[in-house]
């Protein structure tokens, strides 16, 4: 079981006409993700930590700064090629 510690924020982007959305909170808290568990099973913990205003079923995980969205049905380990930069940063 490998744990990857990430910094997490949310972007409240429910209104497509607002162009002043900024990631919240300004200082992103760390969150431990298990690379072997599907992200769909872990996103509720991230949502709760951030107290995000969106409904859980409307949430997605996006990598910064490249903007790639992660497949919530897969684990980080199963998406290792897509999140290579994340692994490089924590190594």
Image: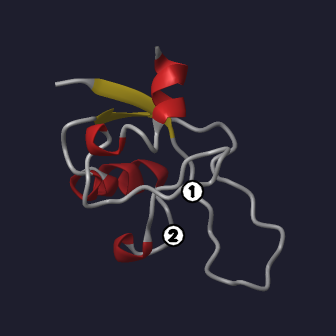
* Picture residue at 22% right of the left edge, 51% below the top: 38
Position in image of residue 44 (x %, y %): 30, 57
* Picture residue at 28% right of the left edge, 37% below the top: 77
Say above or below: 90 vs 50: above
Marks 1 and 2: in contact by CB < 8 Å? yes
Q: Quadrant of the N terminus?
A: top left
* Picture residue at 41% right of the left edge, 75% below the top: 55
Position in image of residue 33 (x %, y %): 32, 36
Say the numbered circle drawn on residue 55. none
Q: Which residue is tagged 2?
A: 53
Query: Judging from the image, what secondary structure is the residue with disc 1 in?
Result: loop
Q: Image check: 38 left or right of 81?
A: left
Density class for disc 1 (Cα within 10 Å; few <14, some 14-19, many ≥20) is: many
User: On the image, which quarter does residue 28 sit in?
Assistant: top right
Position in image of residue 62 (x %, y %): 53, 55
Q: Which residue is tagged 1?
A: 10
């Amino acid at each position: 079981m490998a744990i990857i510690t990430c910094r997490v924020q949310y972007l409240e982007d429910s209104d497509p006409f607002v162009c002043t959305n900024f990631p919240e909170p300004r200082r992103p808290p760390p969150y431990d993700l298990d690379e072997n568990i599907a992200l769909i099973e872990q996103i509720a913990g991230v949502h709760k930590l951030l107290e995000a205003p969106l409904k859980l079923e409307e949430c997605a995980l996006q990598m910064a700064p490249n903007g790639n969205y992660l497949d919530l049905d897969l684990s980080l380990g199963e998406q290792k090629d897509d999140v290579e930069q994340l692994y490089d940063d924590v190594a």
